[in-house]
C-alpha cells in the first residue's frame, strides 16, 4: 500500500469522485434577493398554489427550507418560473414571519401540532343550531385556539329555522363574541352571505366547523366564482356530515376594501395540547390586571387564584371569569363531553 508523506505533491493525491454528480454540500445558503413575494392559496401533495401579483403560480418548497412547511395564508418568497404557464414550477425559498397562526392537534394527547392557517386575523366558527346538533365544547375549543393564535372570533349560527339560538347566544354572551344568525332560506336567497360579508370586509377570515353545518355552502355564496363542492347529507345515525372539503383554500372577496376567506376541511376534533393557558387570558383584558397577585404558574382555576378576589371587589363581571375558566377547562375535556 502506498503511503503519503506530510507534504504530498498535488499530483499524488487521489480524490474520490462524487457518485451523485453534484456539488458538495455547504452551510452557506443563497439569499435569493431577487425573489418575488407571494401568498399560499392552497397546498396539495407537496405542490403549493401561490398568488404572485395577479398570477397563480405552482410551486414547491426548496430543499434548503428543511422541515419547515408552508401553509395556506403564508407570505412566501418565490424564485424560478413565475409566469403561471401550464406545467411550470417555481420554488419557495423563504417563509416570512407569521402575524398569527391557527393551530390544532389531532387530540389532547397528541404532542404534534398542525398549523391550519397562517396570517388570518379572524376565525369564523360556523355551527348549526340543529341537524347536526350544536356542540358547545367544540365551539369552546375553537375559541381557545383563536385566542391562543391571535385571531378574533366570529360566531356564525346556521339553521335557526330548525331551533332557536337563544340558549347558545346566552352561553357566549359574556365573551362579547360578535355573531350572525341565519336560516336555511337565507342561505338560498343570499341574505346570509350578505350578513356575514359585513364582518369580513378588509380582513382575512378562516372558516371552521363540523361537516354538514353549511360552512362551504356559505363560502360558495361569498365567493360564487370559485365554488367548492358542498356536503351531500347529514348521517341520520351519527348526526354528522361527510367531509367534502379536503384541503384549506384561500379565496379573494369581491370587495372594495379587499379581504380573503379561507375554507378549511370539516373537523370532528380540535385538540388543544399545544395551547399555553397563560396566553388565553390575554383575550380577557378586563381580567389581566387581576392576575398580578396570582401565584407563579397559576392556572387561574385554583383556590389560590387572585382573580376571585379581584372579581369579588367589583373590578370585573363574574360571568367573564366563569367564561374564562370554562374555556381553560375545555383542554381537559373531550369534545363530546
Image (tube, helix red, strand yellow):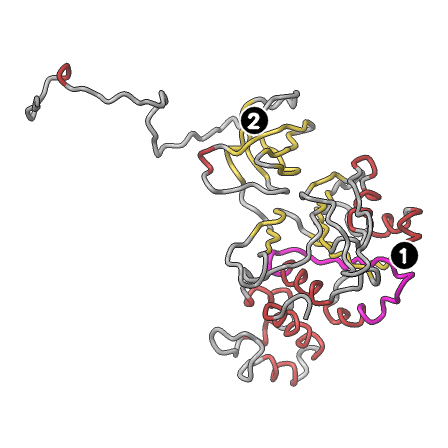
Residue 208 place in picture, x, y as percent: 71, 53
Classify 310 as above or below 126: below
- Determine if the magenta segment contains residue 254: no
Which of the labelled discs sits on residue 183, or is there none? 1
Which of the labelled discs sits on residue 90, or is there none? 2
Residue 305 place in picture, x, y as percent: 55, 80
Residue at position x 77%, y 41% in the image: 257
Q: From the viewer's perspective, is 213 left or right of 34?
A: right
Residue at position x 58%, y 30% in the image: 59
Q: From the viewer's perspective, is 5 left or right of 300?
A: left
Q: Nearer the viewer, residue 147 or 4?
A: 4
Residue at position x 79%, y 53% in the image: 212
Classify 310 as above or below 30: below
Asked which secondary structure carries label 1, the reply is loop
* Measured Cα–Cα span from mark 2 to mark 1: 44 Å
Q: Residues within 10 Å of mark 1 (few under 14, many from 20)?
A: some
Q: Write down the region rendered in magenta.
A: 147-168
Classify 244 as above or below 318: above
Asked which secondary structure carries label 2, the reply is strand
Q: Residue 225 is drawn in which quadrant? A: top right
Q: Residue furthest top?
A: 11
Which of the labelled discs sits on residue 101, or is there none? none
Q: Residue 283 is drawn in which quadrant? A: bottom right
Question: Quadrant of the image for the C terminus?
Answer: bottom right
Amino acid at each position: 500500500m502506498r503511503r503519503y508523506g506530510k507534504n504530498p505533491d498535488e499530483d499524488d493525491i487521489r480524490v474520490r469522485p462524487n457518485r451523485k454528480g453534484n456539488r458538495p454540500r455547504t452551510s452557506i445558503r443563497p439569499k435569493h434577493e431577487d425573489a418575488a413575494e407571494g401568498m399560499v392559496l392552497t397546498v396539495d401533495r407537496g405542490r403549493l398554489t401561490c398568488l404572485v401579483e395577479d398570477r397563480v403560480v405552482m410551486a414547491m418548497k426548496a430543499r434548503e427550507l428543511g422541515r419547515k412547511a408552508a401553509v395556506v395564508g403564508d407570505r412566501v418568497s418565490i424564485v424560478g418560473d413565475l409566469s403561471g404557464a401550464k406545467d411550470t414550477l417555481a420554488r419557495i425559498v423563504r417563509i416570512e414571519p407569521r402575524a398569527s397562526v391557527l393551530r390544532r392537534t389531532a387530540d389532547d394527547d397528541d404532542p404534534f401540532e398542525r398549523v391550519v392557517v397562517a396570517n388570518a386575523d379572524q376565525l369564523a366558527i360556523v355551527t348549526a343550531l340543529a341537524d347536526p346538533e350544536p356542540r358547545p365544547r367544540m365551539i369552546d375549543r375553537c375559541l381557545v385556539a383563536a385566542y391562543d393564535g391571535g385571531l378574533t372570533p366570529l360566531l356564525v349560527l346556521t339553521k335557526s329555522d330548525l331551533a332557536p339560538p337563544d340558549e347558545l347566544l346566552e352561553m357566549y354572551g359574556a365573551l362579547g363574541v360578535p355573531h350572525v344568525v341565519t336560516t336555511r332560506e337565507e342561505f338560498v336567497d343570499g341574505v346570509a352571505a350578505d350578513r356575514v360579508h359585513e364582518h369580513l370586509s378588509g380582513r382575512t377570515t378562516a372558516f371552521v366547523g363540523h361537516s354538514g353545518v353549511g360552512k362551504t355552502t356559505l363560502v360558495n355564496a361569498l365567493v360564487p366564482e370559485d365554488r367548492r363542492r358542498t356536503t351531500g347529507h347529514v348521517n341520520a345515525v351519527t348526526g354528522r356530515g361527510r367531509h367534502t372539503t379536503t384541503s384549506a383554500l384561500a379565496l379573494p372577496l369581491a370587495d372594495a376594501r379587499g379581504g380573503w376567506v379561507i375554507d378549511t376541511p370539516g373537523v370532528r376534533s380540535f385538540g388543544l395540547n399545544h395551547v399555553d393557558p397563560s396566553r388565553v387570558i390575554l383575550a380577557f383584558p378586563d381580567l389581566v390586571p387581576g392576575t398580578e397577585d396570582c401565584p407563579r404558574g397559576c392556572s387561574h382555576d385554583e383556590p389560590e387564584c387572585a382573580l376571585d378576589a379581584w372579581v369579588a371587589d367589583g373590578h370585573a363581571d363574574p360571568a367573564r371569569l366563569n367564561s374564562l375558566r370554562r374555556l381553560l377547562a375545555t383542554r381537559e375535556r373531550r369534545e363530546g363531553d
